Amino acid sequence: MFSIIQAAGWPIWPLILCSVVALALVIERLFNLRQSVVAPPRLLDEVLGLMRQQLPSAEVLAKLEANSVLGGVLAAGIRAVAGNPHLGEDELRQAFENAGRRAVHGLERYLNTLGTIATAAPLLGLLGTVVGMIEIFGSQAPSGSAGSNPQLLAHGISVALYNTAFGLIIAIPALMFYRWFRGRVDEFQLGLELAAAQMLPQLMRFAVRGRPVGG
């Protein structure tokens, strides 16, 4: 492997860097886009059960916010009602939307970088191939000695193509993971929106009770 890297020349080093970064991003996103980290399945039902009689305490809200991304969104809506009992439905909806935007922004973390690597890796591989071909033909004698040793020329061309092959090896899985992560984020975003929509009328029960008579 080291001999291939050495033969491919300096253009392969940016590709190696891209491969290391892409692998790190894939591992990080696999860990942080798990269902248990973003939206535990039973969390919404548990929160609704706690709100049957009264709003959760500040201690419970802190634990809810630290529980998951969904917990943070739900906690933001509860805090909005607790902080302003006269909160209107539009204002509460806006609080949920703001919390949801922050949550989705966090879910999309590093995805642009991964997508850039998936796009740039084949181009870097092609650049390495072009540089290698230029060096191969530039090293041939003006007298045309390359024709007398076609095996040497064929070997040089195969070495130059290592860059393109390595670029594709990086780009294909990076693109697949990028598209899969995008689908996961879209799925989680829909789940957050549905949870907020289900939570809103339950919270409005407490906001309505806090409204002044005739207000």
Image (spheres, rainbow, N blue to C red):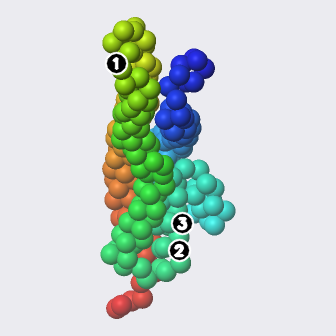
**Residue that badge 1 annotates:** 144
Quarter of the image for residue 118 reads top left
Residue at far front of view: 143
Residue drawn at the location 58% of the way across and 55% of the way down: 64
- Quadrant into which the C terminus falls: bottom left
Res. 173 in view: no
Residue 107 relative to residue 148: left or right: right
State if disc 1 and disc 2 touch (CB < 8 Å): no
What amino acid is at disc 2?
Ala
The label nearer to you, 2 versus 1, is 1
What amino acid is at disc 1?
Gly
Secondary structure beneath label 1: loop
Q: Earlier in the sequence, mark 1 or mark 3?
A: 3
What amino acid is at disc 3?
Leu
State if disc 3 and disc 2 touch (CB < 8 Å): yes
Give x and y (percent) for residue 18.
Answer: 50, 38
**Residue that badge 3 annotates:** 55
Residue at far right of view: 59
Quarter of the image for residue 177 reads top left
Give x and y (percent) for residue 127.
Answer: 39, 37
Residue drawn at the location 33% of the way across and 75% of the way down: 90
Secondary structure beneath label 3: loop
Question: Which residue is at the front of the view, 1 or 169?
Answer: 1
Position of 167 relative to 206 (above/below): above
- The mark found on residue 47 in the picture is none
Q: Earlier in the sequence, mark 2 or mark 1?
A: 2
- Quadrant into which the N terminus falls: top right
Number of numbered discs: 3
**Residue that badge 2 annotates:** 82
